[in-house]
Image: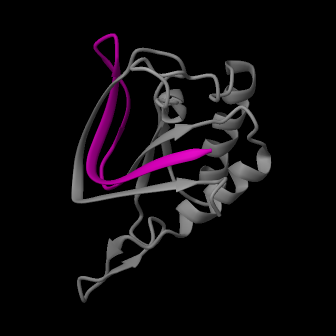
Amino acid sequence: MRAVIQRVSQAKVVVDDNTVGQIGKGFMILLGVHEEDTQADVDYLVGKISKLRVFEDDQQKMNRSIIDVDGKILSISQFTLFADTKKGNRPSFVQAAKPDTAIPLYEAFNEGLRQAGIPVETGIFGADMKCHLVNDGPVTIIIDSQNK
């Protein structure tokens, strides 16, 4: 699994001119599921993200987690994170998990974050989504469960 985590002051996702998910302070996460990912990858990412200390403390140091600041998460499925661009100019997505594998793992990821005490909003898996965000910092972190 690959997650692009952006610290935001606000974010929303729109499908067919309707806002389907919206948060204030927290993370907007783009999540790509690899064809070989399992629940172990979900558990790894949930643990890392829920404890990731990238919010500022009283001394303006990135020392607080999303839980510490009562932040929320906007989670967006993003199969294109597994684009292979080595050959030619058109990306290949053969490493991205098919929906029958990706959807349950994406849902397990979101549920794991909720069980960690973090409110989670989502987009719609497979939909044409328009993501709006104000990246705070900017702070953007990439975590890949295959690169521990």
Residue 36: % across, % down: 76, 37
Task: Tell whether 106 sits left or right of 72.
Answer: right
Residue for point 23% across, 82% down: 60
Residue for point 52% across, 56% down: 143
- Stretch in magenta: 1-26
Residue 89: % across, % down: 39, 20
> Total label count?
0
- Residue extending farthest to the top is 16
Residue for point 29% across, 53% down: 8
Residue for point 67% across, 20% down: 99
Q: Is residue 21 above or below residue 120?
A: above
Q: Is residue 113 above or below residue 104?
A: below
Q: Is residue 23 magenta?
A: yes
Q: Is residue 123 above or below residue 9?
A: above
**Quadrant of the drawing holding the C terminus:** bottom right
Q: Which one is in front, 94 or 32?
A: 94
Q: Which one is in front, 94 or 25?
A: 94
Q: Is residue 22 magenta?
A: yes
Task: Tell whether 64 sits left or right of 112.
Answer: left
